[in-house]
Image (tube, helix red, strand yellow):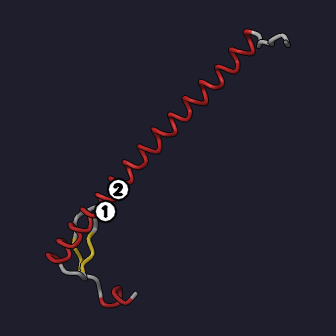
């Protein structure tokens, strides 16, 4: 029967440390993917809400209006601007 070989304490520690680091990185990646999925869902919800507000404002001020989001000023688009 062949004599069993064994890693040195330093080699074993090195391998164990690397495997632990690898597993931690996999968990972090999984957390990041879950967070990304959550954020994408929030963006989708915000897009739906924005579309509702946009429609309500369009109905109130007219579909040919332009809103300056810095000042809140509503302007009717000139006929030339509509064509462009």
Which residue is more in the foreground, 24 or 48?
24
Dot 2 alpha-carbon crowd within 10 angstroms: few under 14, some 14 to 19, many 20 or more? few
Q: Quick check: 31 above or below 73?
A: above
**Callout 1: SS:** helix
Quadrant assignment for the N terminus:
top right
In-front residue for pair 14/43: 14
Residue at 57 percent of width and 30 percent of height: 23
Q: Residue 64 occupies which quadrant of the picture?
A: bottom left
Q: Is residue 10 above or below residue 67?
A: above
* Residue ranking furthest to the right: 2
**Residue that sits furthest to the left in the current view:** 60
On the image, the x and y values in percent for residue 22 come to: 61, 30
34 relative to 79 in the view: left or right = right
| Quadrant in the picture for the C terminus | bottom left
Circle 2 — which element?
helix
Q: Residue 47 bears which disc, if any? A: 1
Counting from the top left corner in percent of width and height, residue 56 is at 17, 71
Q: Can you tell which quarter of the image residue 76 is in?
A: bottom left
> Does 36 sit left or right of 60 as displayed?
right
59 to 24, vertically: above or below: below
Q: Which picture quadrant has residue 51? A: bottom left
Residue picked out by circle 2: 43
* Position above or below: 57 against 27: below
Mark linked to residue 1:
none
Query: What residue do we see at 28% from left, 68% from top?
Result: 68
């Amino acid at each position: 029967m062949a004599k069993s070989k064994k890693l040195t304490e330093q080699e074993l520690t090195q391998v164990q440390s690397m495997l632990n680091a690898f597993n931690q990185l996999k968990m972090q990646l999984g957390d990041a993917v879950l967070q990304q999925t959550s954020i994408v869902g929030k963006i989708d919800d915000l897009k739906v809400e924005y579309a509702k507000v946009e429609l309500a404002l369009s109905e109130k001020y007219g579909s040919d209006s332009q809103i300056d989001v810095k000042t809140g000023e509503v302007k009717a688009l000139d006929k030339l601007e509509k064509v462009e």
